[in-house]
Amino acid sequence: MKDSSDISELAGKLERGTGGYNELFEVVTSFLESHVLGVIVLDEEMVCRVFNKGMSELTGYGQGTMVGEPLLEKLFDEADIAVIREAFGSGEPINNREISVSAESGASRDLIFSMTPKYSRRGKLSGCLMIMTDNTEKKRLRKLLIQSQKMETVGEMAGGIAHDFNNLLEGILGYTTFLMDTREGDEYLQEKLKVIEETARKASRLTARLLSFSGDLGLESRPVDCNLVLAEVEKLLRRTIDKNIIIRIAPSPNLKAVVGSVVRLEQAFLNVCLNARDAMPDGGKIDIRTENTVIDSSYPRLSLNMEMGEYVRVTISDNGIGMTDEVREKVFEPFFTTKKRDNGTGLGLSMVYGIIKNHGGFVNIYSEVGEGSTFSIYLPSSGKRAELEEAGPSVRAEVPAGNGETVLLVDDEPVVRELGIDMLESLGYRVLVAEDGWQGERMFKKKKDEIDIVVLDIVMPGESGGELLEVIKKLSPEKPVLISSGFNRDRVDEKMLESEEIEFIQKPYSMDELGIEIGKLLKKI
């Protein structure tokens, strides 16, 4: 490499027009050979004169095979060639154009391309300088960002739809359970109401899946051993899937725990396994593996949610039909399915996405058509061991009866207000009703001494439930409040729930559920 005095001497030769071009090219080329930049120099006939080491690494072509060749057709597609020739002829530069070039292997490489045409002092075209850098990672990250933003938007929409639908279900399920409790002697009516109740609860489970996708989960947090969770999933699978599908599980010894919900993680793992089952209509195998892993700066960026640290990786693989790239990019979207109509809701994998994201993790999918798919689930490790707790038998809680206490019910949905009046009066309470936050505030200020408890919808237009709650707590700090919402508990500001006098109930709820929650709060007075 020449020093600065040599370069100054060359610059002087160029200025005087006494040569130095070849020597200057030698200096520039020798400098760029040590950098990760692809450099091509073409002469006035568009024949390659310089093809540096960086360009060779980007394309796989040897430097010696390209120099002296008209390489445009070998590297670029027709559209890019047309742009290059036009710029070459007009003397206009090309700056940071995204292009794809053909590598020697036949693969396509994504590059950022810039070109500067060069002219002699007499205005004659003397060649051009092309500089290229690898754009593969930048393009992949941009694709991840677009996908993440799309999923975020769809998640917000899904959560909003589920919230509104839960409000509607509260009217259907609430009145159904109300009639079942108040018309116990009519067997024919009870039979029909039971059908309505079961259908409404199915619809409620559907909205729960939408809320799972949107990240609105109501998540319990405790150390969880994924090996034990997967052992339960394996039991379920062996009872439900065809015998022509082999299940193999390889749990890692000393697997670290993750923090989260046993039930939710079991749902996520089971849904991935069921998706694998559906990808193997003629039989096959499902391989499940767990391991501790560390993500550091050397790891490829698999997700925008990925952060460096210790993870538990759960890998679920099948040798089924596999997925195209187009399908793989859409599998987590709600209602997207490749199954036949009436053979799935398209919410299974979207629920997986929401559950894992809510646990601070992410999912990476590798799949090839005809070769199968591998779902790698990454969950942040807690570094602690945990045991899977056995669930005890469910016991129907006794519903406490009211004794004429006054309940202020604040909700913007007419059907919820009407249903609330019927339920609360049947439970033995006196009811005051407000249709929005402003009316609720006026009523509470006027009658706060006679109001024993407030049932408050948290999401309302105008003055929100959260704003009204602040007013209530300022005027009567000890007043019990039952917050309700079509969203899950996670959407409620945790600061609202810090007080012992405040509890949460999710719509749709039954008369029994409402009565139990109100009874618990009134006991604290």
Image (spheres, helix red, strand yellow):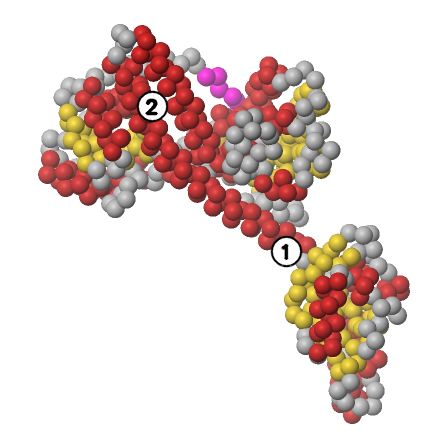
Q: Residue at x 67, y 34 (%)?
A: 374
Tell me if residue 487 can be seen: no
Say the numbered circle drawn on residue 173.
2
Determine the residue positioned at 66% across, 28% down: 279
Q: Quadrant of residue 56?
A: bottom right
Assign a secondary structure to mark 2.
helix
Residue stretch rendered in magenta on the structure: 385-391
Q: Nearer the viewer, residue 264 or 292?
A: 264
- Mark number displayed over residue 124: none
Amino acid type for the residue under numbered disc 1: Lys
Vertical position of residue 182 compared to residue 254: above or below: above
For the residue pair 64 and 259, the one nearer the viewer reads as 64
SS state under label 1: helix
Amino acid type of the residue that numbered disc 2 sits on in the rendered structure: Leu
Q: Residue at x 76, y 75 (%)?
A: 128
Q: Is residue 128 above or below residue 122?
A: above
Q: Which mark is residue 138?
A: 1
Which residue is found at the position 27% from the left and 19% from the top?
178
Query: In the rendered view of the protein, which quadrant contains the N terminus?
Result: bottom right
Judge left or right: residue 458 versus residue 478: right
Left or right position of 303 against 12: left
